[in-house]
Amino acid sequence: MAKTIVVTSGKGGVGKTTTSASFAAGLALRGHKTAVIDFDIGLRNLDLILGCERRVVYDFVNVINGEAKLNQALIKDKRLENLYILPASQTRDKDALTLDGVSKVLHDLQHEFECEYIVCDSPAGIEKGALMALYFADEAIVVTNPEVSSVRDSDRILGILAAKSRRAVEELEPVKEHLLVARYDSRRVAIGEMLSLEDIRGILGIPILGVIPESPGVLQASNIGTPIILDDENPAAQAYSDMVDRFLGEELPLRFLEPEKRGLLKRLFGS
Amino acid sequence: MSILDYLLGKRTKTAAVAKERLQIILAHERADRSAPDFLPALQQEIVQVVAKYFPIEQDEVKVRVQRHANYAVVELNIALPEPKKAAQG
């Protein structure tokens, strides 16, 4: 049975696509056949983050409309042999998505392509694209930044998962929710300038899957179209690796919660 | 903020303010979320019925739901106009 996981947040710009790319790459890296779908119809970006933008011929909407076969639209990653990308359409709008169409694509990814994990990269907002991305989810990764509007929007999305997902509508076991806090700056948390992980967990009331420290490497990885998780040296990459391992059932302590001790010289001249 | 405040540690911890504000607003929003969504329609129909007998305005009828452990109370609060006015109407 394949697992469908939605990466969602409500608010835009918190790191959904970065997380989807690294999470899917991490699963593939560990030998699991994984497909990642961009649900942001009209604002395609997962292809850029994964560095396959020039290989997009057909897209998700083409497949739903029967204008292309799934194997024509799926892009096989060049670095990871277990990773497949289904790009969003850049020209249509979100009304092109239908529940039946999405359901069939998910079914085919599982049964024809034998994917073990299907990662749905949700668009921001709570409209059709976001609802379609979360509808079929078995599990949800809610990406939240330590910032009031992001936390509030995450709470809203949790309410929608509990009311409008397939599991809610069909009264099945509820969607399993995970909290991923991204752009965490432990130094600012330590001096009371930023909501702490414990604050956010307490407010949202869902278990923590990971904490991704704020890191300049994330922007740089996006510049070159490589998911950050593949940059072994980077703290954000290590945090994403931990998060994937935890998702797969390993128990790992959270890292990067304490500020790095910095000498005076580094404080003055370092970044 | 003065340097003295800073040195004395009187700096406002904005994260604590953020936490408190979120706790309050989310408690409200979660309550609204679980409120049955027929309430606006119910309110409107009640206004129509009451308006047949009393000259009232839309905002003079307040409907509120209070949830308890295993029951809920629908509270209806209608501000009727002064008797003299009602007689004229």
Image: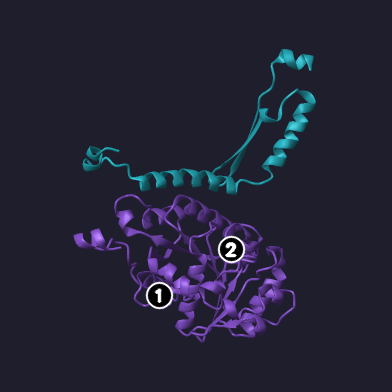
Residue A181 lies, with reference to residue A100, above or below; the image says above
Of A8 and B89, nearer the camera is A8
Chain shaded purple: A
Tell me the tag on residue A100.
none
User: Chain letter of disc 2?
Assistant: A
Q: Residues within 10 Å of mark 2 (few under 14, many from 20)?
A: many
Mark 1 or mark 2: whose residue is earlier in sequence:
2
Q: Is residue A142 above or below residue A32?
A: above
Q: How many marks?
A: 2
Image quadrant for the C terminus of chain A?
Answer: bottom left
For residue A133, say whether it is visible.
yes
| Amino acid at the residue labelled 1 | Ser
Q: Furthest-front residue in view?
A: A269
- Seen in the picture, residue A75 relative to B31 is either above or below; the reply is below
The residue carrying mark 1 is A241
Q: Pinpoint the chain carrying mark 1.
A: A
Per the image, label 1 sits on a secondary structure element best described as: helix
Q: Position of residue A217 (x, y in %)?
A: 39, 69
- Quadrant of the snapshot with the N terminus of chain A: bottom right
Q: Position of residue B87 (x, y in %)?
A: 77, 14
Measure the alpha-carbon separation of dots 1 and 2.
Answer: 23 Å
Front-most of residues A216 and A88: A216
Residue type at tag 2: Pro
Q: Residues within 10 Å of mark 1 (few under 14, many from 20)?
A: many
The residue under the point 54% across, 43% down is B68
Q: Residue furthest top?
A: B84
For residue A65, side relative to residue A228 (left or right): right
Pointer 2 residue: A123
Q: Is residue A206 rendered to the left or right of residue A135?
A: left
Chain painted in cyan in the figure: B
